[in-house]
Image: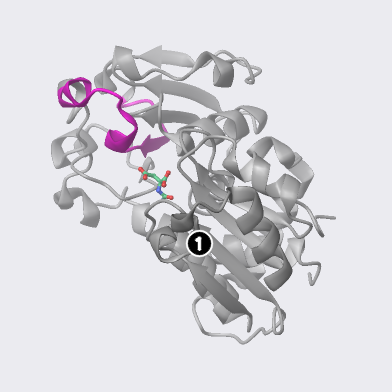
Amino acid sequence: MLKGRDIVSISDLSIEEIERIFEVARKMVPVARGEMKNENLRGHILANLFFEPSTRTRLSFETAMLRLGGSILDFSNPSATSIAKGETLADTVRMVDSYSDVIVIRHPYEGAARLAAEFAENPVINAGDGAGQHPTQTLLDMFTMVEEVGRINGLNIALIGDLKYGRTAHSLAIALDRMGAKIHLVSPPTLTMPTHILRRMNQKPAVHEKLEDIVDLADVFYVTRIQKERFPDPTEYIRVAGSYKITGKVVEKMKDSAIIMHPLPRVDEISPEVDNMPQARYFKQAFYGIPIRMALLSLVLGVE
Ligand code: NCD
């Protein structure tokens, strides 16, 4: 049902399609761990077009493709390509489309992935477009909640940090709302969730300025980095940097069953002492990116 589809916004997927991706991802977990062989993407080529820094997203798409027997064209240094000579995004995409079977793109401008999808015949997957969306991160975030907590519906989920520029929080808020979660937004007053995202949600989220307000209530703490690179004014960044910090003391106030997530990279939002506490799930969450991307690639390439 997803064959040939572009995944640009999380709203491109229905709840049934998201559940289908999770079902395939669950079967991919042993393959992602290297315990089982599955070469269903042999002969397929993925083009990774990264115009912005990335560690997890780029590497997990690569690992997903390699584990399933596929190959990769890597483009992570635009200055080494014809972009540096002034080639347009549309021309680059049209060309790469004819060299590969699926394109994964990350770009600093909101809307770049939608533009790429218009010019490519093969599926285009948005791996982050500026302060826009990051739908595959949302899939792995929700998969983490389902696998680690057991459900999404009815959970109290706190989205914490930079809700203005954080694209992971944008896609996730829209999707969690559709899945029936109770959303709590915790951010400095200057970094609140944009109204264009709030307008796409059916239920009004609760808004808090302080983490203490929900520390003993939330089932999931989704912590995000302040997106320094998107601030037009560096002094504004300095004012909000370090606004929220999850320390061991904060975790002690949480429910035992609560989980702490972060799309990573973290800067100083979560102290290293939290890493070994039972609530910490961010590294496991990063692992889930592999089975989720394996599932998504298999489905859009029509081999699952
Ligand atoms: C996020 C991103 O690029 O939006 N990282 C990721 O993909 N895991 C979050 C961030 O950069 O803060």
Q: Is 230 rendered above or below residue 195?
A: below
Give the residue drawn at x 24%, y 22%.
233
Which residues make up the magenta segment? 215-238
In the rendered image, the residue lying farthest to the front is: 85
Q: Position of residue 274 (x, y in %)?
A: 20, 49
What is the image's colouring?
A: one colour
Q: Does the magenta stretch include residue 44?
A: no
| Residue 100 in view here | no
In the visual, does 154 lie left or right of 123? left
Q: Where is residue 243 in the image (x, y as percent from the top left)?
A: 20, 26
Could you say whether the residue bearing mark 1 is in a helix, strand or loop? helix
Give the residue drawn at x 53%, y 59%.
49
Reading the image, the residue beneath label 1 is 82
Q: Position of residue 16 (x, y in %)?
A: 78, 45
Image quadrant holding the N terminus, namely: bottom right
Tell me the crowding category of disc 1: few under 14, some 14 to 19, or many 20 or more residues within 10 angstroms, Cα based: few
Give the residue drawn at x 61%, y 16%.
203
